[in-house]
Image: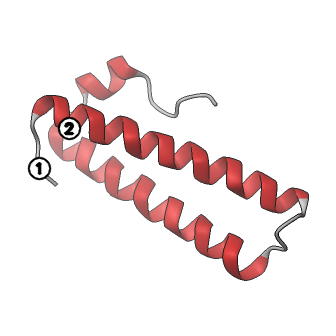
Amino acid sequence: MKPMYDDGDLAAMDPLVLMKNLDHVRMTSRRLSYILQQQVHLYTPAANELRQRIDSYAEAERQIEAEMGRRQLRV
């Protein structure tokens, strides 16, 4: 899976921008999960695409949280 953010870009982000990006990836991941649960049959190609997008956003969330931990920022 291709990371959504480059590590250098994350390191250069202002803390406020970093927190806003974290909020964005969390909300988007949860919205996509809701769509997957409510509207898409479990075995369709569309469901597989949604799962991949959710995984991508979950990975971005992990990256941002790791950078915030490195900087010792609190959400």
Q: Quadrant of the N terminus?
A: top right
Which residue is under mark 2? 68
Q: Name the one closer to the observer, 11 or 66.
A: 66
Which secondary structure, mark 2?
Answer: helix
Report the residue at 35% width, 23% height from top.
Answer: 9
> Is residue 1 found left or right of 48 in the rendered image?
left
Report the residue at 34% width, 17% height from top.
Answer: 8
Where does residue 66 sit, x and y in percent of width and height?
28, 34
> Is residue 43 found left or right of 12 in the rendered image?
right
- Disc 1 packing (10 Å; few <14; some 14–19; many ≥20): few
Q: Amino acid at mark 2?
A: Met
Where does residue 67 sit, x and y in percent of width and height?
25, 32
Where does residue 70 sit, x and y in percent of width and height?
17, 29
Tag 2 or tag 1, which sits nearer the N-term? 2
How far apart in space, not on screen, are marks 1 and 2 (Cα)?
Answer: 7 Å
Please tell me whether residue 14 is drawn above or below residue 57 in the rendered image.
above
Residue 14 picture quarter = top left
- Disc 2 packing (10 Å; few <14; some 14–19; many ≥20): some
CB under 8 Å between discs 1 and 2 = yes
Report the residue at 55% width, 70% height from top.
Answer: 31
- Colouring style: secondary structure
Which secondary structure, mark 1?
Answer: loop
Which residue is under mark 1? 74
Task: Tally the marks.
Answer: 2
Q: Name the one closer to the observer, 27 or 44.
A: 44
Hey, which residue is sitting farthest bottom in the picture?
A: 38
Hey, which residue is sitting farthest right in the picture?
A: 44
Residue 71 picture quarter = top left
